[in-house]
Image (spheres, coloured by chain):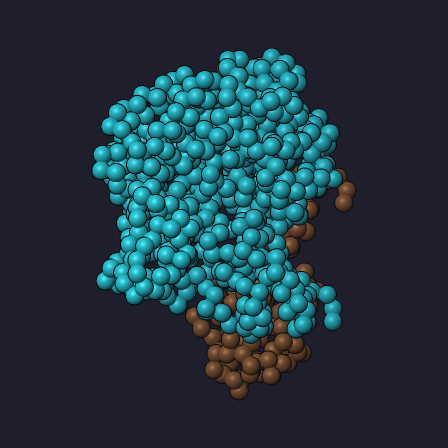
């Protein structure tokens, strides 16, 4: 039969999340099933980047209908091919379900998780094959670059970005246009454009998803910035723990160079731009701009005092501009549609959208892009679908280890730079961890501080030693050895570290402790004064006890106890000696009648 | 692939590349073919493949080809619906492969309904 185009596309998520939940095996099954039915010409398989709803992975979207199938296992594939692709019937059981629509939501765009989103930076993620530059071009890719090089002056490009009101998405929130202008005005002919892809906050994967799912948007954004600033060389500093992102970036650079969209005399103009990928070794502090540049130069990744700012004296002493992945990814759309278009989205001072990695005790964990000004309540309860097992909401941690915890009273706070800062958190790079009533806030503060303490580069004494001291105090509190003066000491140390550290790491590291002290002081008091963990999370403050009424005296617990802490006669209730117990939980697991519990 | 040196070059690539992703959105005009067991038994698969060939032959873009389950008019299969933007949904029935080029040329391209094969219309 004559040639024809595929009538349908099956989009398979190839992001890190879905790959981890088995997308590779699903793809292999699709290939087999389609071939077996002679449908491999009419249905095309496309591997895309992340769809954002990682909780529901592996995700399969069937077009042209836009049907969204979730948690697809290899054994489900035959049914999708037979029922949907062959016979045109939905596979109901694999659709996404909500409490209001138990029968399933067939269309991608009708799922609440997606319908509330405004996707600019993530527009292509999960929609195109990131390893095919033509698919990016089909979605207006490199149109902004061509428009800028052929029809706009560098000043015009700069002005559009200024008009857009775009601010740094890495956390600082500094106006991007202004930052570019500093670099543009700096003296010198050699300048660098740098992309900070050293995303390292626990639970954050916004940048990774863009790097993996739409690498060309970052390349195009950087080139627009380079054109506006007069830079001819660029670096993408990406952590080595993102192998898929690095692979996709390098492939994207190769394809863009092949088409003359990157390299010497781009699009036949006098503008040239050379781009390199630099793999970082995964030090958190290298996300700080001066440390990042030191690392590119081959030096030890440590921050240095500013001024001089990178705009004047950056990489190898040349004027440089650093923006993070998400900031760069917004630029092509701004140039394509105009700064005013972008400025129409969001609030008065925070324009456009922000990508968040929604994690923790929320039903729909994943990646979301929302307009600035949306409330935390909408994010957690509408996009996030509420708390797992419908437990009670307790707090949300915004901004990663540099951010803070906000309570139920802050649920209606709009998500914008100013409102979050006023509430004691920060926008940060976009980590959003939801906590329920079973989360211990002292433990959470300890978790984030453990991270920053470990990642402190050691240059500034307050950060290096101060975070260690704070961690010691927190550890003691969670072990039930807290002293009443600990709370004041934590606050004192925290403020000192914030004021006396050179870079953002130290200046923000105490934030999780300070905000939990402010909003959850009663939990600290319970740990210190009553030696109790109200959430039941701190191991040391819990005791394993045997319910004498339930115990049948089978002796199983006594036999598995590694320290001989359980005593009792056969067929009579046993008891645990709290002085000997190491709280390993072996007895609880061994008990056949569930007589052992912690409280 | 040759290097891109002008806006026109880029547009050309975009033009060709739009085919790559065209199937990822519902076309302006939709052709929907019944693929129930009844439809398949009556030859709906052949009808559909011929539709795809015909669209390719004419280089028609922005037309999506979808399938659907049995709608209960099994005696009229194979069934094929055409929905042009802003026009009623026209259902054709008892189709043969020979009807496909006519429906594509007359209805999909020119907007003239092929009356002798119509079995229903929905506003």
Q: Nearer the viewer, residue A376 or B1?
A: A376
Residue A362 at what x, y percent from top left?
37, 50
Q: Is residue A516 left or right of residue A467?
A: left
Q: In this view, does A267 lie to the left or right of A391?
A: right
Q: In this view, does A281 lie to the left or right of A393?
A: right
* The colour assigned to chain B within the rendered structure: brown
Question: Which of the 4 image quadrants contains residue A444?
Answer: top left
Q: Spot the residue most to the bottom.
A: B75
Residue A46 in the image: above or below residue B110:
above
Q: Is residue A269 left or right of residue A80?
A: right
Q: Please give the name of the residue rendered at 46% of the width and 41% of the height, measured from the top-left corner.
A: A203
Residue A67 at what x, y percent from top left?
50, 62
Residue B52 in the image: above or below residue A325:
below
Q: Please give the name of the residue rendered at 54% of the width and 44% of the height, measured from the top-left corner.
A: A209
Q: Which of A365 and A158 is in front in this view?
A: A365
Q: Can residue A2 be seen in this view?
A: yes
Residue B100 at what x, y percent from top left?
64, 74
Residue A355 at what x, y percent from top left?
45, 40
Q: Spot the cyan chain and give its letter.
A: A
Total numbered circles = 0
Q: Please give the name of the residue rendered at 50% of the width and 21% of the height, measured from the top-left corner.
A: A458
Q: Quadrant of the N terminus of chain A?
A: bottom right
Q: Please give the name of the residue rendered at 74% of the width and 68% of the height, measured from the top-left corner.
A: A2
Q: Which of A230 and A18 is in front in this view?
A: A18
Residue A38 in the image: above or below residue A26:
below
Q: Spot the residue most to the front.
A: A569
Question: Which of the 4 image quadrants contains residue A376?
Answer: top left
Q: Can residue A382 be seen in this view?
A: no
């Amino acid at each position: 039969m004559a040639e024809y185009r595929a009538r349908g596309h099956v989009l398979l998520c190839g992001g890190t999340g879905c790959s981890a939940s088995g997308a590779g095996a699903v793809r292999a099954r699709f290939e087999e099933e389609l071939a077996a039915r002679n449908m491999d010409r009419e249905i095309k398989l496309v591997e895309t980047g992340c769809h954002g709803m990682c909780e529901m992975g592996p995700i399969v979207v069937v077009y042209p209908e836009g049907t969204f199938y979730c948690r697809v296992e290899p054994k489900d594939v035959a049914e999708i091919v037979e029922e949907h692709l062959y016979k045109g019937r939905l596979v109901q059981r694999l659709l996404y379900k909500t409490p209001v629509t138990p029968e399933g939501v067939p269309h991608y765009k009708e799922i609440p998780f997606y319908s509330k989103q405004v996707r600019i930076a993530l527009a292509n993620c999960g929609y195109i094959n990131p390893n095919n530059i033509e698919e990016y071009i089909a979605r207006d890719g490199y149109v902004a670059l061509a428009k800028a090089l052929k029809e706009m002056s560098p000043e015009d490009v700069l002005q559009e970005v200024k008009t857009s009101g775009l601010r740094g998405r890495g956390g600082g929130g500094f106006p991007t246009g202004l930052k570019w202008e500093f670099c543009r005005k700096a003296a010198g002919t050699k300048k660098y454009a740098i992309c900070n892809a050293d995303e390292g906050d626990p639970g954050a994967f916004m940048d990774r998803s863009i790097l993996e799912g739409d690498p060309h948007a970052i390349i195009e954004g950087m080139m627009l910035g380079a054109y506006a600033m007069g830079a001819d060389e660029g670096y993408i500093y990406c952590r080595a723990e993102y192998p898929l992102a690095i692979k996709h970036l390098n492939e994207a650079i190769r394809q863009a160079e092949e088409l003359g969209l990157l390299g010497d005399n781009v699009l036949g103009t006098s503008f040239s731009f050379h781009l390199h990928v630099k793999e970082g070794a995964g030090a958190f502090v290298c996300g700080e701009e001066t440390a990042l540049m030191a690392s590119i130069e081959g030096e030890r990744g440590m921050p240095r005092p500013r001024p001089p700012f990178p705009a004047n004296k950056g990489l190898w002493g040349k004027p440089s501009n650093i923006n993070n992945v998400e900031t760069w990814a917004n630029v092509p759309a701004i140039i394509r549609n105009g700064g005013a278009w972008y400025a129409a989205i969001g609030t008065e001072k925070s324009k456009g959208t922000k990508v968040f990695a929604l994690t923790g005790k929320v039903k729909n964990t994943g990646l979301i892009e929302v307009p600035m000004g949306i409330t935390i309540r909408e994010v957690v309860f509408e996009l996030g679908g509420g708390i797992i097992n419908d437990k009670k909401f307790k707090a949300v941690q915004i901004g990663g280890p540099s951010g803070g915890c906000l309570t139920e009273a802050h649920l209606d706070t709009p998500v914008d730079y100013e409102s979050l800062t006023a509430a004691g958190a920060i926008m940060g790079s976009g980590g959003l961890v939801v906590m329920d009533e079973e989360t211990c806030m002292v433990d959470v503060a300890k978790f984030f501080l453990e991270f920053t303490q470990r990642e402190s580069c050691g240059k500034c004494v307050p950060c290096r030693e101060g975070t260690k001291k704070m961690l010691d105090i927190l550890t003691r509190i969670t072990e039930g050895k807290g002293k009443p003066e600990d709370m004041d000491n934590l606050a004192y140390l925290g403020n000192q570290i914030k004021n006396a550290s050179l870079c953002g790491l130290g200046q923000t590291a105490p934030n999780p402790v300070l905000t939990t002290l402010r909003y959850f002081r009663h939990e600290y008091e319970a740990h210190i004064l009553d030696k109790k963990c109200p959430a039941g999370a701190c191991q040391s403050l819990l005791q394993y006890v045997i319910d004498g009424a339930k115990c049948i005296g089978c002796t199983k617990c006594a036999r598995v106890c590694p320290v001989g802490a359980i005593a009792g006669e056969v067929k009579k209730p046993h008891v645990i000696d709290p002085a000997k117990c190491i709280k390993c939980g072996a007895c609880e697991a061994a008990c056949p009648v569930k007589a052992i519990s912690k409280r | 692939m040759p290097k891109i040196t002008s806006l026109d070059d880029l547009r050309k690539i975009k033009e060709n590349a739009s085919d790559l992703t065209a199937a990822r959105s519902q076309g302006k005009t939709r052709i929907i073919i019944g693929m129930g067991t009844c439809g398949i038994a009556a030859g709906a698969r052949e009808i559909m493949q011929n539709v795809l060939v015909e669209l390719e032959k004419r280089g028609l873009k922005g037309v999506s080809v979808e399938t659907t389950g049995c709608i209960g008019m099994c005696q009229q299969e194979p069934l094929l619906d055409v929905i042009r933007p802003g026009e009623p949904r026209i259902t054709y029935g008892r189709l043969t492969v020979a009807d496909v080029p006519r429906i594509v040329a007359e209805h999909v391209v020119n907007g003239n309904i092929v009356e002798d094969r119509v079995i229903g219309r929905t506003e």
